[in-house]
Every structure is written in structure tokens, then in C-alpha cells.
Image: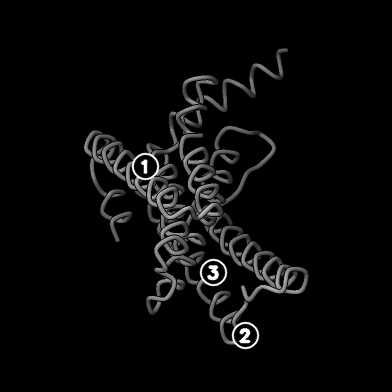
Amino acid sequence: MFILVCLNMNKLSLRFGGIILSYILKIIMIIFLFISIWKLHWIWIFGCILALIVSFVPTILKRNYQITLPLVLEILVTFALLLHVGGGLLGAYNIPNYDTFTHFISSFLIAFLAFVIIYILHVYWDGLIMDKYAMAFVVIITTVAMGVIWEFNEWITDIIFGTHEQWGYNDTIKDLFIDTIAGVLMASIGVTMIKRGSFEKMTEEFGEQIDKRIIKSKNG
């Protein structure tokens, strides 16, 4: 819900609030790292460090390569990682529907990333011209497809390592259903934002940087 609120704020408020939220999520991740060290949970020490590195990728891209990713994407990535680490480290996965919520956020992140990539290519690359409803359809299919790949991954992991990532048929179908809902929701939000022009504003800086690199590669 906080994502929908952010998307309807003006650009300045979104930027300021998003930066604050991003830092808060990273601070919580650092706290999780100290907790995992205190408990000597080596797998989650590694998980926290990896999650922190991934969460700082947008900052590294901006500083070293002048690539500015949409702030909402950075928040979603950090939030999804935080939920996963917290679920394992603090045992939150035992809370009813926590796993479902975490899975939904991860699927929504994939759908959002897919929509951003397709939209950027449509606007700034001559090789792709796509109607906004076609974009929405591709986003839904991509989200569901990634969900299927993830279920295959869990199934193979259980066979090889004897784990219990898949809890049964109903759990698998529920996850795929959640993937579909997340894809449809993001597709609907994306289409609405394109109509309002807010999606263009949100991705404008990133798109212009990609456009410059495309032009540079053609001339280079």
C-alpha cells in the first residue's frame, strides 16, 4: 500500500521520502547483520552481507557509472531482501501468511522491473514499439514465468539437498497464484501511470541516461 501512496506524491516529496525510507530499510538490514553475528548464524551473516551489497547497487551505479535507477525500484529491492532475511533470521516465516506476503512483494518487484525495462526500451530504443496494454500483458506473463522458474528451483533444491522449500501442491499453486496477482496489479498500476504521465516522470532520468548510452554506442 505504501508503494501506491508514494507513486501519487509529487516528485520532490517522493524523492525525499523515498531516500529516507531507503536509508531506514538499510539501517534495519545492518541491525539484522549484528543480530546474526551475535547469534553466530553464519548463513544469515552471509545473507545480510549479500543483501546489503545488492541494496547498495543503485548507489554504486549512480556514483561510478552515472546510472540512476528509479527510487521505487531501489526501495522494493531493499524491502524484499529485508523481508526474506528477517523471515529466516527471526523466524518470521512461522507467522501466518508472512511467506505469502514476502512472495507477493518479490513478485511485484519482478513485475515492476519488467515494466520499467519494457517501457524504457519502448521509449528510447527504435527496436521496440509496444502499446501500453501489450506492455501490461508481457509484464504479467514475465512475472508468472519467473514464478514457475522459482518453483522449479525449489523443487530441484529439495531433490538435491533434501530440503523442504516446497511444502506441497497447494503451496506451489498458491505461490503461482500470488505471482499472477502481483503481475496483474503492477500491470494495472503501470498502465494507469502511463496514462497520467507519471511513469514517464519516474523513469525519465534513467531513460535519458540509457538513451545517451545507446546513441554513444551507435556513434562509437
Q: Amino acid at mark 2?
A: Gly
Q: Secondary structure at mark 2?
A: loop
Q: Residue 28: percent from the left, percent from the top?
A: 33, 47
From the viewer's perspective, tell me whether residue 35 is left or right of residue 187.
Answer: left
Tell me the distance, in whole angstroms, between the alpha carbons under discs 1 and 2. 34 Å
Between residues 145 and 60, which one lies in front from this camera angle?
A: 60
Q: Residue 10: percent from the left, percent from the top?
A: 23, 40
Earlier in the chain: of badge 1 and badge 2, it is: 1
* Chosen colour scheme: one colour
Q: Which residue is mark 1?
A: 26
Q: Amino acid at mark 3?
A: Asp
- Residue at (55, 21) in percent of width and height: 65
- Residue at (73, 12) in percent of width and height: 220
Q: Residue 81: percent from the left, percent from the top?
A: 47, 52
Tell me: residue 86, above or below residue 196.
Answer: below
Tell me: residue 106, above or below residue 181.
Answer: above
Whether pointer 3 and pointer 1 mark residues with C-beta atoms closer than 8 Å, the reply is: no
Q: Which residue is mark 3?
A: 179
Q: Which residue is mark 2?
A: 168
Tell me: residue 91, above or below residue 211.
Answer: below
Quarter of the figure with the N terminus: bottom left
Whether pointer 2 and pointer 3 mark residues with C-beta atoms closer than 8 Å, the reply is: no
Earlier in the chain: of badge 3 and badge 1, it is: 1
- Residue at (42, 68) in percent of width and height: 91
Between residues 33 and 18, which one lies in front from this camera angle?
A: 33
From the viewer's perspective, tell me whether residue 20 is left or right of residue 164.
Answer: left
Q: Residue 94: percent from the left, percent from the top?
A: 42, 76
